[in-house]
Image (cartoon, helix red, strand yellow):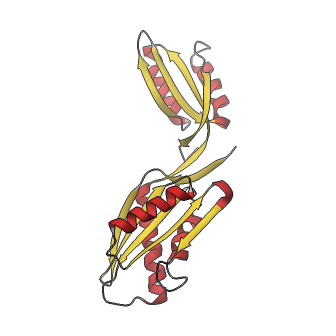
Amino acid sequence: MIEYKTVEFEAHDEFEEKKSRFIGYVKPVKTQQEAQDFINSIKSKHWDATHNVSAYVLKDNNIQRSSDDGEPSGTAGVPVLDVLLKEGLVDVCLVVTRYFGGTLLGAGGLIRAYSHGSKIAVLAGNIITMAECRIAEVNVDYSFYERLTSLLEGLGANIESTDFADNVKVTFSIKEDLFEAFSDKLTDISQGKYKATVIGEKFSKVNKNN
């Protein structure tokens, strides 16, 4: 089974180091064009910044790129890229914007600052695990609905939709290797009354603890 880590949404955070302002931006991307468009958008937004340092990693073909954007070689783009690699993140683009505050930070200071700007951006974007999941649905009586949701949550499944009619139809996604365990438990606690039907597959966010 294939799974990978990425960020859930576009986000940013910032801090100040010796009067230099660092703003870290992160966004989930799928292609080099999407990454470059994001980098360009930040450069356009912060056209007056001293530097807009960037890096991205793409799952397809394991593409890795970084740019110092005028900072001394190895002090900016590489530390930003290293944060993505150490966290094991793919399909993610980072841009750390710097407004110079008048005090030189030195090579070590720059590395620490760009690393920190990247880390706080990644945390703001919420690291998630994506995995191959089965999409399934099950129809249950209202009296069984809470037990079903508890079972799904316990296995790290995501409820995609719930339709309340004469009974309750729950559509959910669950990691492929956990579907059989779910089916067995559902049969057991419902004494064979309910059964889930697989209707598709997709990559989906899963509970990191499962």
**What residue lies at 43% left-to-right and 64% top-to-bottom?**
40
Q: Which residue is drawn at 61% across and 51% down?
A: 4
Residue 9 appears at what percent x and percent y? 43, 51
Q: State whether residue 59 is above or below residue 143.
A: below
Residue that lies at the very extreme toward the top in this rendered image? 166
> The N terminus appears in which quarter of the rendering?
top right
User: Is residue 141 something that shows in the picture?
Assistant: yes
Q: Can the viewer see residue 122?
A: no
- Residue 46: image quadrant is bottom left
Q: Position of residue 84 (x, y in %)?
A: 55, 65
Quadrant for the C terminus in the image: top right
Depth check: 196 or 104 in front? Answer: 104
Residue 30: image x %, image y %? 55, 52
User: Which picture quadrant has residue 143?
Assistant: top left
Q: How many numbered markers are drawn?
A: 0
Going by the image, does 105 lie left or right of 80? left
| Residue at position x 57%, y 53% in the image | 5
Q: In this view, does 209 lie above or below 118?
A: above
Q: Quadrant of residue 194?
A: top right
